[in-house]
Image (cartoon, grey):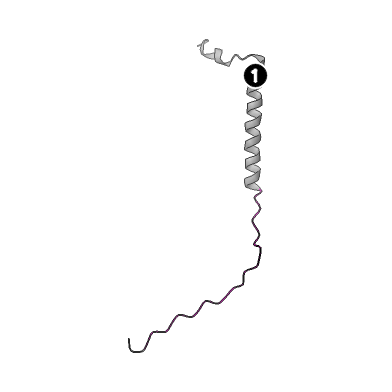
Amino acid sequence: MKRLFRIFELSKSEQRVVLIVMLILITIAFIGYERRVHHYPVRPTSPTEAKPSPSPLSPKDGQ
């Protein structure tokens, strides 16, 4: 069991690398979260006007 925990014994430079990688990953996750939460909707460039739809054709009397 003691042998299994030896993988966690890191030198100072290895510890720094792990910390830097963790900080980078947390920063990327935070930026992605902020972009999703504060997503601004796109404004249309010109206002659209409502047009009435054409009335359906009436069936012919003979049919």
> Magenta stretch?
38-60
Pinpoint residue 17: horizontal percent, then vertical percent: 64, 22
Q: Is residue 53 left or right of residue 18?
A: left
Residue 42 is a magenta residue = yes
Q: Residue at x 55, y 77 (%)?
A: 52
x and y percentages locating residue 28 in the rendered image: 63, 36
Q: Quadrant of residue 27?
A: top right
The residue carrying pointer 1 sits among few (fewer than 14), some (14 to 19) or many (20 or more) residues within 10 Å by Cα, namely few
The spot of residue 29 in percent (x, y) is 62, 37
Q: Which residue is mark 1?
A: 15
Residue closest to the far left: 63
Horizontal side of 53 relative to 26 (left or right) equals left
* Residue visible at 58% across and 16% down in the picture: 8
Question: Residue at the location (55% across, 15% down)?
Answer: 7
- Tell me residue 1's x, y (percent): 50, 11
Residue 61 vs 7, above or below: the answer is below
Q: Where, by quadrant of the figure, is residue 24 drawn?
A: top right
Disc 1 on helix, strand or loop?
Answer: helix
Which residue is farthest front?
45
